[in-house]
Structures are given as structure tokens and as C-alpha cells.
Amino acid sequence: MQLKSLRLASALLAFGGLITAPAHAQNAKVPGGLVHEAEFQRLWEQNGDRWAEEDKEIQSKLAELEAKFGKKPNIIHILWDDMRYGAVGHRLLTDISGYEAPNLEQMAQDGMSFTRMYTEPSCTPTRVAAATGRLAVRSGMVFPIFPIHRMGLPATEVTIAEVVDDTYHTGLFEKAHFGDQEEGYVTNQGWDEAIFSLYNQFAGSAFNSGAEDQGYSTAYSPDGYDKKYFFDDTFRPLNWMWTVEGTEGGEHREFSTPQSPQDYIEANAKMWERTKEFVTKHADSDKPFMLQWWPNLYELSDQDANRPFTTQHATSTGESIKKMDAKIGELFALLEELGIADNTLVIAMADNGPMEAVHPETGQNGFFRGGKNDVTEGGIRVPAFAKWPGVIEPGSVTGDIIHVSDLFNTFARISGRYDQIPKDRVIDGIDQTALFLNGDTNGRRDYVFTYKGPAMGSIVKQQFKRLLPVGPGALAGAEFFDLYKDPREEHPLMAEFLWAWAQFDAMKARHDAQIAEYPHTPVARGEPYTGVVRLEDQ
């Protein structure tokens, strides 16, 4: 019996090269001693010597930049909602979408365009991955949190704001979407100051009678109550809260819970002004700043506020994108005016694909199939751009795979705080500084695991993709794709890809084995809004 057990163990370890030692030992040679996802460890074993030499050159370049400007670079991350790949950034494509975003087009000309930027399928998971460098499933933040879910980001998660700590001024404005638990409030997760939403912009714009009149919600207001059999006043989330203002270690105050579409628009305008104030007041500081400006897109529920339509798309979405793009232009002009543009890295991107449920507002996908909440390319492959004058080559395009979680590691490297990334948990993000500095083909990722809720839905490896079956079967089905030949994933193959069946199974097995060693953190749960002073009490 003992011999049989030993043989079984040997077979399991041989299957796909599963981890044969604790992950912390396997990752000892990886930069920073991090517990990287198992697949990256395999890449490092094959490429680590070359990458280590490249890292020495990168560190020298970063040191030269710091000496030139007298401090490390400022970092701005712009993240908006629900947009298909190709909708903005390049005139050749925007003439198809009908959107107008000239400042994003200029950003692409001045910087880098990413053709394979992957996110999570929906907004909360993407924002958590960006903030923590970890797939959202690892902290239980697996779907967009709405009023009143009584859940949020666990205190044990370490955000990029906590990594840079007091070496940077940090601020987050508009959409955080980390939930309604006090431990998950942005300013309890490392940011110095913030005005942040607990939920998403749909709740902020649509949970009121005005939006109901426009058809963006139904039966929320008293007109929609059951007239004969109504017994529960608590069923609707009437006592909810949308945005909170706070500082690290300071008081948290309710900022806005819109009672009308106009309230929502005015709150966003105030948050935008505070965003610019953050940049201005820290421009001359001895410390650089890191800004997460994650705007609340879109403003749909007040159709009259968007008339007359001025874009070819002829929707409120088109007007919202045009307004956001104007703000991006205003932000770039402010950086120039303050004399800090050359020492500021700006990344602008969408958080997932279009929300097809509100067609034609956010539009159907074009190049790819699917949208928000899908694990097909249309749900997780988004427009993304980066600008860093004098560092990123103007007009460059990269086909390297990059995942939103990689920004965590990349910002940590650029800020000189890589050694502050925690080493007691799996880090899914990969340092992609080489890609930013050296351009196309210098990325370090060739895979993406994507979860839909708590279950893995797809795996990308190189140009190949497997949509995972719902349950186990005797034989792999028609679930494999070559994304160059079939980018819309409309022609699933089976027999032609049987060579890849076991390889994808092995990737998932290694991934799952690492989860067994480093279990997921339970999502935070409890009473919502604790520690926040309500508007009526201010």
C-alpha cells in the first residue's frame, strides 16, 4: 500500500511538472523572493538569467532618471469602465466606433499602445487586481459589489499604496468599488487621501426616481411598489451610501449618495476638481505622487444632459467618453503647466469589455466576441495606453501580453519599493518595467488565468486559448482557439489541439496546487458603512 501511494505521488508530480517543493523555495531566485504564480516560475527558470541582466540595465536607467529630476517619477493610473478594444486611441478604429477621443489618440501617438492588455471580466475584480497584484479570487472579491452586499476588501490585502507607503503622496478619486466594509475603505488600505465610491457608478446614477423615469432602473421608487401585498420596507436598499471622503488615519465622511441623475453628475464634477487639486498641490513636493483617477463612466441616466449628441456614436456613452477624453487632455495640459510632464508615467485603460446589456449605449464588441462578465476576449481584452516622455518610444505598439495585475509590480519597481511587496502570499502580477522601457517583445508574460466568479473560466498561453468546460468530461471538447486565426473565438477546435489538452490541464493543476498551499483569503463581511459620518449628521 505504501509503495502504491509513493507511485501515485510520483505520477502526480510528474504530471505537468507540478510543484515539487514549497512555493517559497521554488521562487527563491525570482526578483524580490516573491511567491509568484507557478507558471511564471517556469518562465523564470527558462529566462531568468537573461532577465536578471536586463534588470540591472533597467535599474541603472531608473537611477539616471531619478538623478535627472531629483525624485522618482510620478505615477498616474486612469481606469474607466466597459469599453471594447479599438473603441478609442487610433483614428483608423475610432471612425468605426463613432467615438471621439482626440486626447487618447494623441496619447497613443506620444506613447505606447497595448494590443494584449488583459483585465478581469468585471469592475471590482479588475480594480482589486490592479491594487493588490493578485487575482481577485484570492481575496474573495469575485464580482461587482452592489448596495448592500455587506462585503469588501479584506484588511490583510496589501495594496500598491501600502507598498509605496510614505515615499509617495497617494490619492484615489472617484470609483474604487472595494465594497462597503470599513477595513476595505481606500484610506484604510494605504491611500493618503481619497474620495471613493463603495459601489459602482450604475448604483450612483440609477438608484433614483429620475433614472427610473429614463428606464435605467425599475420598481426602485414608491411608484413601483406592490400596491396590495407590500409588507417589507427593508427589501430595497434605500439607506445605502455611494461615495466617501477620507484621509489615512482621519475621519471618513459621506460625500454623496445621489438622489437624482443631476446629483450624480455634480458629484463627479466635484471629484474631478479634487483630482486636479491633488496633482497641483504635490507637483513641487520633494516626494513624487501616485494618483489613481478611476472616473465614474458613464453618465447615462440623464439623457437630456447629454443632448444634443455631438459624436458619430450618437449616444450618451459617446458624450461621456468625449467628456472624459477632454479631462484627460486637461490633465496632460496641467502636467505641462506644472513642469512635471517629463517625470510622470501615465497609464490609461478600460477595466473590462462593453456591457452588452445596455446596448446600444456601450455597444457590442467588434474585434472580439463577448463583453463584460465574459471570459472571451471581448470581456477581458481592452484599450490601453502608456505615456512617459523620454522613456517610452512615441508611437510604439506592443503585442506582448500584459495583465492589469502587472501594474502593481511595475509601479513597485519604478517607485523603488519592490522589496515591500509581501512574500507570504501568491503574487500574480509580473514586473513589466522592461516592456515600458525597452518596448515590444520585452514583456515577461505569455499566459493569463481568468476567473468568472470563483471558478476559472479560461486560460491563455501564447496565442492559444482554452475555454474551460463547466464540468469534467472523458475527453476535451471543442474548446481550443488560436487567437491569431480566430480572434473572435467563433470556431472552437478539438482534434487539432489535442497536443495542448494535457498542457493546459497541467497549467491548471499547478495553479490549483499552489492555491492548496496558499489558500484564498475570505472576503470581509459585516455591517456596512461603519466609521462613516452620514451627510445628515455633518
Image (tube, rainbow, N blue to C red):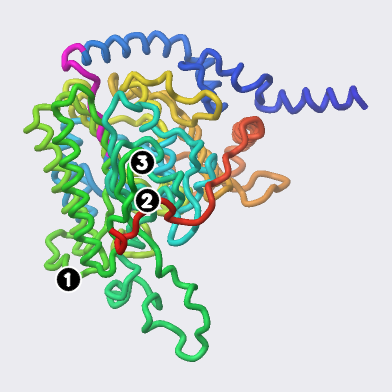
Looking at the rendered structure, the secondary structure element under dot 3 is helix
Q: What element carries label 1?
A: helix
Q: Give the range drawn in magenta.
A: 67-77
Q: Which residue is drawn at 70% across and 48% down?
A: 473
Near mark 3 (Cα within 10 A), the count class, few <14, some 14-19 or many ≥20, is many
Q: Name the disc covering residue 353, or none.
A: 2
Pointers 3 and 1 in contact (CB under 8 A)? no
Q: Mark 3 points at which residue?
A: 187
Residue 304's tag is 1
- Badge 2 vs badge 3, beta-carbon distance below 8 Å: no
The mark nearer the N terminus, 1 or 2, is: 1
Q: Is 244 part of what is drawn in magenta?
A: no
> Quick check: is 71 in the magenta stretch?
yes
Label 3 amino acid? Thr
- Amino acid carrying mark 1 in the image: Asp
- Taking the image as shown, residue 442 lies to the left or right of residue 327, namely right
In this view of the protein, which residue sits in the foreground, 369 or 518? 518
